[in-house]
Image (cartoon, grey):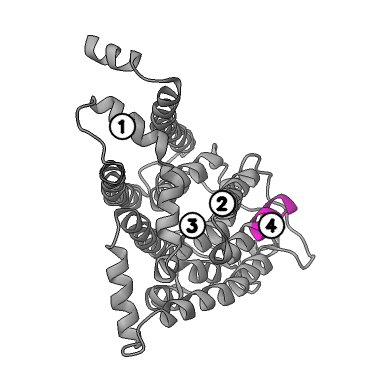
Amino acid sequence: MSDLIGSLGSLSPQQLLALSVFSSYFLLILWLFSRVLESISLTSSKNKDPSRRASKISLFWGLTIGSFAHTWFYMFQYMAWSFANYEAKEAISPTSTILQRVANWLVNTSLFEEAWYTVCLGKINWAWSEQLCLFTVGAWTVFLYIEGSRHQITHVWAYMILGQVVAISVASNLFYVALLSSTRPKRSDKDKSTDADIAVPAKLWLPILISILTIATSPFTTETTFLPNLLVMHALLIVPLLSISPLKHTKSWFKLSIFYLLIFLISIPIRSRTMLAAAGSLPETDASALALVQEQWKVLHSHPAQSSIGWDVVWSSLSFIVWSALTPSASRSKLFTIPYLILATPFASIGLTAPYVLRPRHADTEVSEKGD
């Protein structure tokens, strides 16, 4: 202990600040987990029959643990790589204490920016990362707001921030647990409105549309505009979730069914441009679809930061498909939905298939919870 105190005393204010910020990151994660677990506990306590969906809840707890362990295995690998890369590049002498070496690394390295540069700059790297951005900004933010309001989930904002600092797959699985632990309010027999008629408030649609714009412009950013563009996308998604209003229904054109469709349609050209650019980066000698898939697999394991976000895409996609298969839906029949998700998601990305599947249809009536 005395050695640790002595090492801390030898650090400069800048080094101490860097260590404090790094430590605060992990404290933030622990605090967010506590908020989310409290949210699930409060929701579960209101459920009169908590054992009704026990098997489904256990499944999503398993997916939570699996996605967390897998994505953070690579996250810790990335931190170790970044530390070793910094010391090799700067020719750091190992004579300093480990605390001083870590402090110097943190002072001279922006981990957040370095990681995102790694996963965004290459055309195929961005083809991976864009999938998670489109899903998070579009379908998942709307899903959090609408279902959080419907099921009266507390601290919905914590799920979004947890997804941003840990992994979207981890946060989404925890939100699925919260939904399964809740009791869905019964609708009055006199209420003829459907999910398709749910009004989308400006505080939800405006941040989402601006955030989608930041995704579209991301490949064209420079060293000076890349980080601000990225931060705008992250920050805007939290805003509508800080204060979730009760759901209202409307007969106007701007309703939930239209908004999900709009997200889907806007995402098509964005995703198409990215995949064409990725295909165009292949050598002319072999520009086949198989070559593109092989290159994507190679890039997925080219860097630990890329592996972390790439496998987050895979886990998020898998978890959404499982959720869609196991829960009632106000959209299309599962005979269409599940094959569509399984076949289309690997090619189109979860950023496109999720809003299409989540979009409620006017012809559908409210789905009962029978068999949940």
Residue 250 position in % (x across, y down):
76, 60
Task: Find disc 3 in the rendering and name its residue.
Answer: 369
Identified by mark 1, the residue type is: Val
Residue 336 position in % (x across, y down):
45, 78
Task: Find disc 2 in the rendering and name its residue.
Answer: 147
**Secondary structure at numbered mark 1:** helix
Q: Is residue 200 magenta?
A: yes
Name the outermost residue toward the bottom: 285
* Number of the label disc, if any, that sits on residue 205: 4
Residue 198 position in % (x across, y down):
69, 59
Cα distance in 3D space between marks 1 and 4: 42 Å
**Secondary structure at numbered mark 2:** helix
Identified by mark 4, the residue type is: Trp
The residue segment tinted magenta is 199-210
- Is 93 or 109 nearer to us in this picture? 93
Toward which corner of the image does residue 317 lie, by quadrant? Answer: bottom left
